Image (cartoon, helix red, strand yellow):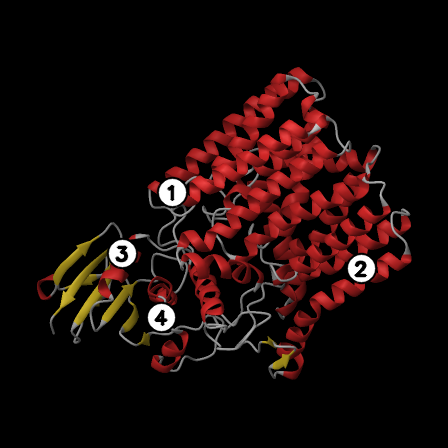
């Protein structure tokens, strides 16, 4: 792990050193400004790299993604469906987006499957997005120096982007890729070279297509954004009709596998194999869209109401996504977004402003159609942060007042960082919303030497079915997918399929007030608080959340 930290640190700061040395805009600014920029780049790095392998602990969706990444790399198949080159993972039975597990394959294949190796690509992509946006802002003259720095600070030091960079559910890839698109767009509108503009436009188009493989809940956003974006560029004279057609052809080719995937799951109900790829037939859909609800209008009203409340509060009830009290954007910061949007409407607009406004408007579908939390709303995060920065520059229009604001922002930022770390140390993340205690790794490794292992958890104190813990032995022990399927008892197709027995592993869901009664010899990893006759068991290992026992039978 230390060599990974060291390598990332050296490369990141080497790139910064070369950039600062060779960029004309940075060479001309004051020493004080250079110090502010360097402090930002250091902070943005540290809050992402600090204990990223431990904080938060392993999420069940991370484990599921990691299992599939390992299986694709080693066996070439989806772990729970055994198909080659799936365009969408079978996962829990209700699917999982493919892009991040696919990106992680070489890391997991070379370094082995661990929480570190599975999160590593997300950390690297986030750091690249920081460097790329910094490069694009200082390579061009699209913003003034103070505006450049403010935009970087607001986007990359807000809790919502920091938290999303630290745990590797596949949808968290969406935010840094949006930043990449923003960076490429800045370069696109700033260059006068026809060849460069075409290259940037094609690259932007490819990344828009890739976003479709990041998070299926954003497909409506992507469709709306693509239509509005290319139409706007055409009307502004930035591109011609030929470039529009080429862009849509690229998007169509890129998204064709997902179009076939939708056809398979909603029309034909039969799996399709094409060009070496598989359009997977899922057990069921797990979409959060209101359009799947019978009471559509009621769902839309409830979603909009709850979305507004969540945005204002800045907290969706899940501390690993947004720190409690400080929220997704830090206190009062959303008010600056409102100022930024209002001033955009009534004042002179830049091309960049309109680009981000199109993205913001396109993402409003999510507030109406999707059950609110900040993971579901990751398409709207970067536009909100952009208009926050714009609003701040409008509200604090002189250097002295801006310094005052930055002092307050820094205090809130430090408070949020402390809250995030304290929540981890206090155990807030453990046994909560799919997050599992790290001590289970060692306990599962130790128990693997026995013939019978029972992992006993309770659903009473967490928001997820503890039978979903079946992914943990697979993740930590890397069980062969073909062996798993041979030894698995039949699982009923459902939104969250569970396997309560495979090989030596037994997954038990027990109410916290129920007494554990065993008739089988073996090792029991039991969540603390579950009642049991300890006289019949030999204690092997005691942890903060679980205890390992041996029962002779």
Position in image of residue 32 (x %, y %):
61, 17
Q: Mark 1 or mark 4: which comes first in sequence?
A: 1
Position in image of residue 526 (x %, y %):
24, 61
How packed mark 1 is, by other alpha carbons closer than 10 Å (few <14, some 14-19, many 20 or more), is few
Residue at the location (55% across, 52% down)? 172
Q: Mark 4 or mark 2: which comes first in sequence?
A: 2
* Residue 442 circle label: 3
Circle 2 residue? 247
At numbered mark 1, what does the secondary structure look like: helix, strand or loop? helix
User: Does 381 appear above or below 224?
Assistant: above
At numbered mark 2, what does the secondary structure look like: helix, strand or loop? helix
Q: CA distance from mark 3 to mark 2?
A: 50 Å
Look at the image and tell me whether residue 241 can be seen.
yes
* Residue 2 circle label: 1
User: Does 521 appear above or below 445?
Assistant: below
Q: CA distance from mark 1 to mark 4?
A: 27 Å
Q: CA distance from mark 4 to mark 2?
A: 43 Å
At numbered mark 4, what does the secondary structure look like: helix, strand or loop? loop
Viewer-side label of 1, 4: 1
- Tally of numbered tags: 4
Left or right: residue 544 compared with residue 225 = left
Point out the residue furthest to the top here. 400
Left or right: residue 6 compared with residue 205 = left
Q: CA distance from mark 4 to mark 3?
A: 16 Å
Q: Mark 4 or mark 3: which comes first in sequence?
A: 3
How packed mark 2 is, by other alpha carbons closer than 10 Å (few <14, some 14-19, many 20 or more), is some
Residue at the location (58% across, 30% down)? 17
Q: CA distance from mark 2 to mark 1?
A: 43 Å
How packed mark 4 is, by other alpha carbons closer than 10 Å (few <14, some 14-19, many 20 or more), is some
Label 2 close to label 1 by CB (< 8 Å): no
Circle 4 residue? 479
């Amino acid at each position: 792990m230390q060599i990974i930290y060291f390598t990332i640190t050296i490369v990141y700061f080497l790139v910064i050193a070369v950039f600062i040395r060779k960029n004309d805009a940075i060479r001309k600014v004051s020493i004080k400004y250079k110090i502010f920029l360097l402090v930002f780049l250091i902070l943005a790095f540290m809050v992402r790299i600090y204990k990223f392998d431990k904080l938060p602990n392993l999420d069940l969706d991370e484990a599921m993604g990691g299992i599939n990444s390992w299986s694709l790399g080693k066996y070439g198949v989806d772990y729970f469906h055994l198909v080659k080159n799936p365009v969408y993972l079978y996962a829990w039975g209700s699917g999982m987006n493919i892009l991040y597990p696919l990106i992680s394959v070489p890391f997991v294949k070379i370094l082995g499957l661990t929480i570190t190796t599975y999160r590593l690509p997300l950390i690297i992509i986030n750091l690249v997005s920081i460097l790329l946006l910094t490069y694009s802002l200082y390579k061009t003259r699209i913003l003034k120096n103070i505006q450049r720095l403010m935009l970087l600070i607001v986007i990359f030091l807000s809790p919502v982007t920091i938290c999303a960079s630290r745990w590797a559910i596949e949808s968290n890839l969406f935010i840094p890729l949006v930043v990449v698109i923003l960076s490429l767009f800045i370069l696109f509108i700033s260059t006068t070279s026809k060849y460069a503009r075409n290259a940037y436009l094609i690259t932007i188009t490819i990344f828009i297509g890739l976003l479709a493989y990041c998070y299926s809940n954003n497909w409506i956003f992507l469709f709306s954004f693509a239509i509005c974006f290319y139409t706007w560029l055409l009307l502004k004279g930035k591109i011609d009709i030929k470039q529009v057609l080429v862009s849509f052809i690229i998007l169509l080719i890129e998204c064709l596998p997902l179009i076939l995937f939708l056809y398979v799951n909603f029309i034909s109900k039969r799996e399709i194999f094409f060009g070496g790829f598989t359009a997977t037939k899922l057990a069921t859909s797990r979409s959060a869209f209101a359009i799947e609800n019978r009471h559509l209008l009621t769902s839309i009203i409830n979603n909009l109401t709850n979305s507004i409340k969540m945005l204002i509060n800045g907290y969706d009830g899940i501390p690993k996504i947004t720190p409690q009290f400080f929220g997704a954007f830090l206190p009062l910061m959303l008010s600056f977004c409102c100022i930024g949007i209002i001033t955009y409407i009534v004042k002179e607009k830049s091309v960049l402003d309109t680009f981000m406004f199109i993205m913001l408007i396109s993402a409003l579908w999510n507030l109406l159609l999707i059950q609110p939390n900040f993971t579901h709303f990751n398409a709207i995060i970067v536009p909100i942060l952009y208009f926050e920065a714009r609003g701040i520059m409008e509200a604090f229009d002189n250097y002295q007042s801006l310094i005052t604001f930055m002092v307050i922002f820094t205090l809130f930022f430090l408070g949020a960082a402390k809250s995030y770390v304290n929540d981890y140390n206090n155990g807030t993340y453990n046994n909560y919303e799919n997050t599992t205690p790290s001590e289970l790794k060692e306990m599962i490794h130790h128990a693997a030497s026995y013939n019978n292992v029972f992992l006993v958890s309770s659903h009473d104190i967490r928001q997820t079915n503890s039978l979903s813990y079946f992914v943990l032995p697979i993740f930590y022990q890397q069980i062969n997918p073909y062996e798993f399927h041979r030894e698995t008892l039949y699982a009923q197709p459902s939104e969250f399929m569970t396997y309560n027995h495979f090989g030596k592993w037994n997954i038990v869901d027990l109410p916290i007030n129920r007494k554990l009664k065993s008739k089988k010899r073996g090792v029991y990893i039991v969540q603390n608080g579950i009642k049991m006759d300890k006289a019949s068991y030999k204690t092997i290992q005691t942890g903060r959340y679980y205890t390992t026992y041996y029962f002779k039978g």
